[in-house]
Image (tube, helix red, strand yellow):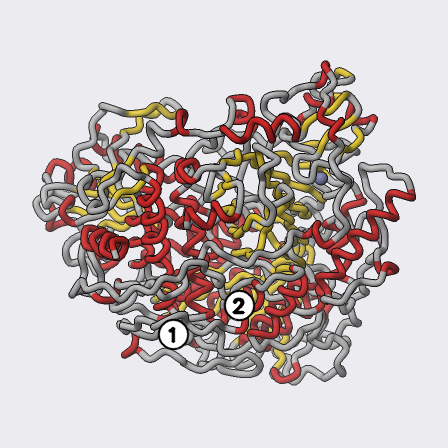
Amino acid sequence: MSAPAGLPPRPAAAAAFSPGGPGSSLEAAAPASGAPRCQNGGIDSSQPVHSVSQNVPFTKPGVGTSASSAVMSSVRSPAPSLSSKPLSSPSVTQSPELALQEGMQYGGYVNNQASSAPAPLSSSSDDEEEDEEDEEAALDSSSTTSSASPVLNNYDALEGGGYPETHSVTSSPVPSPSVLQASKASKPFGYGYPALQPGYQNATPPTPVQPSSTGHHPGFQQYPQQYPGVNQLSSSLGGLSLQHSQQPESLRPVNLTHDRNILPVSSVPAPVPNLNSDLRKLNCSPDSFRCTLTNIPQTQALLNKAKLPLGLLLHPFRDLTVKYLTSQLPVITSSTIVRCRSCRTYINPFVSFIDQRRWKCNLCYRVNDVPEEFMYNPLTRSYGEPHKRPEVQNSTVEFIASSDYMLRPPQPAVYLFVLDVSHNAVEAGYLTILCQSLLENLDKLPGDSRTRIGFITFDSTVQFYNLQEGLSQPQMLIVSDIDDIFLPTPDSLLVNLHESKELIKDLLNALPNMFTNTRETHSALGPALQAAFKLMSPTGGRISVFQTQLPSLGAGLLHSREDPNQRSSTKVVQHLGPATDFYKKLALDCSGQQTAVDLFLLSSQYSDLASLACMSKYSAGCIYYYPSFHHSHNPAQAEKLQKDLKRYLTRKIGFEAVMRIRCTKGLSIHTFHGNFFVRSTDLLSLANVNPDAGFAVQMSIEESLTDTSLVCFQTALLYTSSKGERRIRVHTLCLPVVSSLSDVYAGADVQAIVCLLANMAVDRSVSSSLADARDALINAVVDSLAAYMSTASNLQQSMLIAPNSLKLFPLYILALLKQKAFRTGTSTRLDDRVYAMCQMKSQPLVHLMKMIHPNLYRIDKLTDESTIHVNDRVVPQPPLQKLSAEKLTREGAFLMDCGSVFYLWIGKNCDNNFIKDVLGYPNYASVPQKMMQLPEVDTPSSERTRSFISWLRDSRPLSPVLQVIKDENPAKTDFFQHLIEDRTEAAFSYYEFLLNIQQQICK
Ligand SMILES: [Zn+2]
């Protein structure tokens, strides 16, 4: 038991949250990790040319060998540096005078981030410094500004600090499982940050709001009651309270220790913000954009009192055009993209029109002109109704951007596969699955006529494949000088998919058998990645790395750091951070060249994912992990890989992307979570963006929000589509501001809170310790419930009471503590733990919640009662069961939906009719151990079961693997570990956890 006495030492990175300019703070965080500065293009691309040490002919089974005489041309010349010319605004025509003035402001702003020194005015290039495209310019020009140094994202920054009310409490006397005892002396996270200044405060203040501007033109007062002017608000705010509307349900006190049935019958919906019906209809879908508090506290002091974290959960690029979604994505092709001249916010449904020609920004309150083109509405073909334009009618829109939003012609889709072909890899047998999947989906890879593709394989050497059109067959080129890797025939390794399709197919057909008899056990992953970086640098694109073991040769080699005896440790868990900065530096280099690295780790033994994952974390890539992968011994993993690959290869992809999150003046974003590179305080660089990526941000309240009743958040994602279009996807979320603590609790979004805390706990685990992170999670519950109970005067202090909005909070936190990421005392392999942490940081809320708290249904007695009808299909809706073995009767069958896996648990005495009708076997004993499909049996119960499961499957982009679990099945352990309400040797039951919380509150 590691109960820290007093405040734990504050790591150097905590300095990142000291007051001061955001730029300097982020800069200050960088050296804390010890990572040296890394420049874009850091890997020298102009090194001396070496000859290829081996030039082995490509051998295809059944085809004779042909001596290859591939020309070893010199390595490519350095990539031409990209233009960083200033761009002019597509939408706003400004007077030169104004432009200059604003340019100064934003020049200063940008440069404040590059260094803490005041920026010379001459550096403010022009009025559009703020634009995403200009930020790209800053990166691509590999200048020595902030973009050239690795401004770490917050994996390295400690959350917390400045906890205002540290009261020391001795550890809990609950005798057993001691691992859950939290010391309140440990700093919680989520509130009390000495906050950063919002970006615009670094510049001269924006144009003050003119009091007269609140006078609405009679004809253009679209949202008089929804968005009152500043003057009206200040008078009305005093009495603003949501008690009447929300008290009945979200504030209803729930006695947690008494009420054991807190789980709703169906999935927990996102709370609906307390807005009037017009705004509610216009608001952003919670599937894309959620806030931990749907009622925003008016001041930081009020937020501190609530003891809840304030932040956003984003799923900005999710699929909006697939079958299971009804929502539409309006795509706007107008030549004029209307944005605020001051803060560059995109016009949105929550701005106010002052008159026919002017609109007021809802983020900075600047009054802007309505451009002439915007007066015409292409939808209604009418003139003079700017408020009816699609941009003002939809909170999620996508713009086709003009060339003003480009630094270079939009890049083609470029895919490079980097494949481990060592003995270990061949033994695992993933190549067959990958090549087959690629062959099946080659025509479905997102792209256009320019799409390019290439392959690199590696063991102790690195092998390249010349696929140039016109060759009779692919040529393999081996480079064995892995200490000084270079590209043989750089021009023919990434080839046009359409022109070289036959050669590509030949290679994919041959690859699985080419290394069958290899005795190479070494893995030169680092050199292969260096080669991949060089190959991709001229264009950017996506690198997909398949690795099956610890890299053992050349740059980036790793050593085993896991002590298997420590897997069940209840104390210190070591090596959650990287062993080397090689992968991070490589990722930053890649990010600088618009290249993301995705990692597929298929390993049977420790591979140091904590180090390898950095290649994806910092390049906006994604991470897939298949422990104990074997193509035949582990059919569940093999099927999962197959399904993941299908989704991976065919899903939408955005290239050379940047994302900026803006919020109403007074709010400030200070910490980002996800896979990306933080380029400036609020700009994320995403070499690739994919529809399955989630992000989270933490916020603080810098200035009190007393002058407004609504706040807004806007995400703008600028990317290049696989068809070569430059597009901007914009989401805008609007939320009310409240002044009372009970209103803050009434609007709490418990799932968003838990997901944000999970992200913060991962950071805390790496930067401080796992024990510290666990304590902080427990304290988050203890503190918020204590704060709530202290405000509700009529509550008996002997009970543990939560507002209805937070009744699931302790349950979800307990579930988090039992996750592989955070658990202690239960044997957990280090890579498994690190992967769970990676998932917490990069999954969208909907997936993360299923991972934290799976849905359990009893399915052996499905009836036609309480069904829903979906596309002529009758779908049963069994109620959710709590995650406890007490629910699992031996007579039943239960389906557990964990997001990417469905477990179908069959009780020993399960009705034979169900086994016969649904599983297609005569009895329990005859059901095979590795059953992964439900047969199509022509019985009502089979139809109901399959209908229910396919309805669940259709609700997500990735089709989950189904695993039937019988008593003897090894996967049973996984299934039972999800029953988080039960007690284990190492952890509390839910009820014990509640008692523990209650004791801590009463102290
Ligand atoms: Zn603005």
| Residue indicated by mark 2 | 14
Q: Is residue 62 left or right of residue 564?
A: right
Residue 962 in view in this figure: no
Quarter that holds the C terminus: bottom left
Q: Quadrant of ligand 1?
A: top right
Front position in the image: 697 or 853: 697
Image depth: mark 1 or mark 2 in front: 2
Residue 978, how many percent across, how many down? 26, 53
Residue at image point 33% right, 65% down: 168
Helix, strand or loop status at disc 2 = helix
Q: Which mark is residue 606?
A: 1
Helix, strand or loop status at disc 1 = loop
Q: Which amino acid lies under the numbered mark 1 shown in the image of this protein? A: Tyr
Quarter that holds the N terminus: bottom left
Q: Above or below — where is 94 with respect to 81?
A: above
Residue 13, how many percent across, how many down? 54, 70
Front position in the image: 988 or 694: 988
